[in-house]
Image (spheres, rainbow, N blue to C red):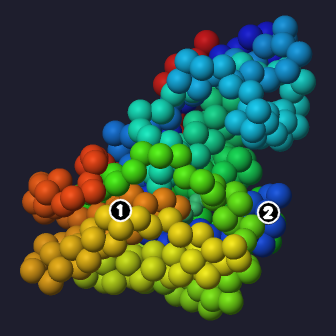
C-alpha cells in the first residue's frame, strides 16, 4: 500500500422499526434477534481516515477536538479489527463530524461506525463487498451494519460473523415515509447501548421479545413492501414498546423516557385515530421518532412543535447507504 492514503465517507444514522436489543455474542456483536430500519437522509456522520506510516498510535478528532480515553479506545479497537482484515500495520488518523446531536436517541454510533468502516476500507484501496462491509461495521456498533446499505435495511441474525449481515430490502425512493424527530433532550445519555445490550438478558421478558422478533420483522417487511401504513404502525409501535419494556425490567433498570416522551407518544396515538398516518418509535433515548407519510409530515411537525417539552423537530426522509465522498 502507498503511504498516507486517505478516504472520506459519509453515512446516515438509521431508525429501527424492528429493534436490536441484546447480543448472543457481545464481542462480535451478534444480535439476539434480527432487526429492520430506515436510513435517515439529511443527518450524517462524515469521517476521514488516513492510514499513516508515521504514527505510533491511532488518533481521533471529533468536531475539531482531539479525543482520548473511551472514545479513542473504541475507535482504535475497531481499527485493529479492520487492520487485521486489511492486512495493514499502519495506524490511522481519524477526523469525524456529525450534523446531529450525539447520544440522545438518534443513533450516532450507527452513522459513525458505518462511515469509519467505509472510509478505512476505502483509504486502504481494498475491494470488499457491501455484505462484508456490513459485517465489519457491525463489529464497531451493531446498528452500524444497517447504515451501510441504502434505504430500508434488514440485518439478519446468525451465530457466525460472516452471516450476520445487513441488506437493503427496498431503496430510499420505495416509499415516501418521513421520520419527524421530536427532540426532547440533547443531553448525552447516561447508559449507552453497549452496556444496555449486556443487560438485556437480565429481563425476564427478553426471551419472549426475541421469540417473536422474526415474525414481527416479516410483518414489518411486508408492510413496507406493500406500503401498508396501518400494518406498519401496528408492528413498529409494538416493537418499540417491547424493547422499552425490556429496558425498564432489566437489572439494573434503564428508563430512557422523560415526561414529554410519554406526552408525545399519547398524542401520536390520538392523531392516528383522527386520521393522520403517523406512528412512534424510540431508540435508546427520550427523543420520539414519529414515522409518517410525506403528506402528513408538515401537520405532524407543527403539532409536535406546539407540545411543551419539544425543544427541536427534525425531518428526515429515507436515506442512501454509506458512500465514499472523497479519496486520494
Ligand atoms: O448499535 P447500538 O449498539 O448503538 O444499538 C442500537 C440499539 C437501538 O438503537 C436502541 C435499537 C436499534 O435497533 O437501533
Helix, strand or loop under label 2: loop
Q: Is residue 75 above or below residue 131?
A: above
Looking at marks 2 and 1 on the same chain, the residue that comes earlier in the sequence is marked by 2
Q: Quadrant of residue 253?
A: bottom right
Place of residue 32 in the rendered image (x, y in percent of width and height, measured from the top left): 70, 75
Residue 126 seen from this side? no
Q: Residues within 10 Å of mark 2 (few under 14, many from 20)?
A: some
Q: Is residue 283 above or below residue 251?
A: above
Residue 80 makes an appearance in the image: yes
Circle 1 packing at 10 Å, graded few (<14), some (14-19), many (20+), is many
Counting from the top left corner in percent of width and height, residue 285 is at 48, 59
For image coordinates 42% across by 45% down, the residue present is 186
Q: Quadrant of residue 99?
A: top left
Please give the residue where the numbered disc 1 appears in the rendered image. Answer: 288
Where's residue 192, x and y in %?
63, 55
**Which image quarter is the N terminus in?**
top right
Quarter of the displayed picture in which ligand 1 can be seen: bottom right
Residue where numbered disc 2 is placed:
26
Say if disc 2 is inside 8 Å of ligand 1. Answer: no
The residue that appears at 81% across and 67% down in the rendered structure is 25
Q: Residue 123, relative to residue 142: is it above or below? A: above
Left or right placement of residue 102 versus residue 294 in this view: right
Return the mark for residue 18. none
Amino acid at each position: 500500500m502507498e503511504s498516507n492514503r486517505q478516504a472520506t465517507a459519509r453515512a446516515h444514522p438509521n431508525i429501527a422499526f424492528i429493534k436490536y436489543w441484546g447480543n448472543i455474542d457481545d464481542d462480535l456483536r451478534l444480535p439476539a434477534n434480527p432487526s429492520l430500519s430506515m436510513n435517515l437522509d439529511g443527518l450524517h456522520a462524515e469521517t476521514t481516515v488516513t492510514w499513516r506510516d508515521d504514527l505510533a498510535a491511532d488518533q481521533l478528532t471529533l468536531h475539531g477536538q482531539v479525543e482520548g480515553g473511551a472514545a479513542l479506545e473504541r475507535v482504535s479497537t475497531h481499527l485493529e479489527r479492520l487492520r487485521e482484515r486489511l492486512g495493514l500495520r499502519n495506524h490511522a488518523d481519524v477526523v469525524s463530524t456529525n450534523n446531529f446531536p450525539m447520544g440522545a436517541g438518534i443513533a450516532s454510533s450507527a452513522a459513525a461506525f458505518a462511515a469509519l468502516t467505509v472510509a478505512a476500507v476505502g483509504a486502504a484501496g481494498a475491494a470488499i463487498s457491501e455484505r462484508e462491509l456490513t459485517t465489519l461495521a457491525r463489529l464497531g456498533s451493531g446498528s452500524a451494519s444497517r447504515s451501510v446499505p441504502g434505504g430500508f435495511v434488514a440485518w439478519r441474525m446468525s451465530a457466525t460473523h460472516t452471516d450476520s449481515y445487513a441488506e437493503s430490502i427496498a431503496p430510499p425512493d420505495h416509499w415516501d415515509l418521513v421520520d419527524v424527530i421530536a427532540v426532547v433532550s440533547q443531553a448525552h445519555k447516561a447508559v449507552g447501548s453497549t452496556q444496555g445490550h449486556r443487560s438485556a438478558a437480565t429481563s425476564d421478558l427478553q426471551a419472549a421479545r426475541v421469540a417473536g422478533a422474526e415474525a414481527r420483522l416479516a410483518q414489518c417487511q411486508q408492510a413496507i413492501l406493500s406500503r401498508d401504513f396501518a400494518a406498519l404502525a401496528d408492528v413498529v409501535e409494538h416493537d418499540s414498546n417491547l424493547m422499552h419494556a425490556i429496558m425498564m425490567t432489566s437489572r439494573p433498570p434503564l428508563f430512557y423516557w422523560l415526561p414529554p416522551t410519554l406526552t408525545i407518544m399519547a398524542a401520536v396515538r390520538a392523531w392516528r385515530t383522527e386520521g393522520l398516518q403517523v406512528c412512534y418509535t424510540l431508540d435508546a433515548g427520550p427523543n420520539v421518532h414519529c414515522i409518517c407519510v410525506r403528506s402528513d409530515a408538515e401537520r405532524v411537525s407543527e403539532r409536535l412543535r406546539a407540545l411543551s417539552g419539544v425543544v427541536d423537530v427534525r425531518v428526515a426522509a429515507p436515506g442512501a447507504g454509506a458512500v465514499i465522498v472523497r479519496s486520494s
